[in-house]
Image (spheres, helix red, strand yellow):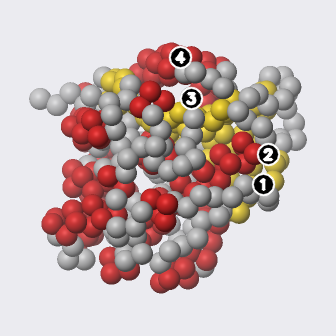
Amino acid sequence: MLSFGEAVDRVVGLGSHLLHGWRGAGTNTVDDLGPYLDAPPEVIFPVPVVPRDVVRRRPRLVMGAKRITETLRWHSQHVVLCPHYRARHTGEYWLNQRVTARFIHPRSGQRKRALLFVHGWLEPGPRVEEALLLPRLYDELGVDLVHIQLPFHGSRNPKSALFHGEFFWSADLVRTVEAVRQSVIDVRTLMAWLRETQGYEEIGVTGLSLGGGLTMALACVEPTPDYIMPIIGHLKLGEAVEEAPILWRMKSDLERFGIGAARRKELFQRLGLGTMKPKLAPERQLWVQATDDVYITAPLVKQQWEEWGRPPIEWIPGGHMTFPLSIGKILGRMKQFHGALPHR
């Protein structure tokens, strides 16, 4: 019998058939994957330079709050590797070249420690996290917070998309890989700006679901964050495509393109995301995972956890979509972990 968490995940998975059922990926780009296959991490995720074009905008009116939320905007440093994809990137998807982040700090001035938050798939904007999660992280951990918007979401979502995030995960594999690349590059650029121009002495990263996986990827390329706290995420995309109900459209479209299970396994192995190894020490990682998650399954999490040297891990009851029921436990464990770190 399914647990409550598993049941909710499966119902949402069925609901995704309504969301993703309108259309699938229109372009089979498997033959254009050459620049990415077997490429080392430093090629896929090049080191960014400190951006000099960051524009800061404060709200015109702030009443009573001890903290202030600014909007940051800059031009993405992401450079496409696939020649055939460049026309789409600079044309139909030009909005992705404008990066936006929300920067939360005390009205009296910035502190010395910052935490970046990377949101999940299909999220249209930052309002839910800024209302429910980020203020509690801000208070519990005593850090400034920066919430970055991912490609193909929110203000970066092209008008041709039916919903936010439609173009991030799909069987258009070049577009998917480039979305992951750009996400990691944009977060690393933001980290560099915070360190070099704002004087932050410690920068951590946390993320939820898709954001959790991207947070893990950041631990695999230098310079790394000072610590990471991924929530219900892993890097084993190939296995998730085969097993996660919410990714049924991606798997179905790859089948439609003639990419069977064996070929899919080979491609995802050679793309290398699932086999990346951390440069960040295990004791500077805190994983938060759900015991009954149908999308980020416990066996896959445990496999990657073993491969990464068994970093601290907090198991919460329930599934992927019911994690908010454990938000108190999650925040308590994050506060404990952060407080025990040897801070600079």
Residue 309's image quarter?
A: top left
Q: Earlier in the sequence, mark 3 or mark 4?
A: 3
Give the residue pinned by disc 2. Answer: 197
Q: Earlier in the sequence, mark 3 or mark 2?
A: 3
Q: Earlier in the sequence, mark 1 or mark 4?
A: 1
The three-letter code of the residue at mark 3 reads Leu
Question: CB of mark 1 within 8 Å of CB of mark 2?
Answer: yes
**Distance between mark 1 and mark 2 Cα atoms:** 10 Å
Give the residue pinned by disc 4. Answer: 340
The three-letter code of the residue at mark 4 reads Ala
Q: Which of marks 2 and 4 is nearer the N terminus?
A: 2
Q: Earlier in the sequence, mark 1 or mark 3?
A: 1
Question: CB of mark 1 within 8 Å of CB of mark 3?
Answer: no
- Helix, strand or loop at mark 4: helix
Rendered position, 211 above or below 20? above
Residue 116's image quarter?
A: top right
**Which residue occupies 42% across, 75% down?**
35
Rendered position, 286 above or below 259? above
Question: CB of mark 2 within 8 Å of CB of mark 4?
Answer: no
**Distance between mark 1 and mark 3 Cα atoms:** 26 Å
**Which residue occupies 22% across, 66% down?**
266
Left or right of 328, for residue 274: left
Q: Which mark is residue 133?
A: 3
**Distance between mark 3 and mark 4 Cα atoms:** 21 Å
Q: Which of marks 1 and 2 is in front?
A: 2
Give the residue pinned by disc 1. Answer: 54
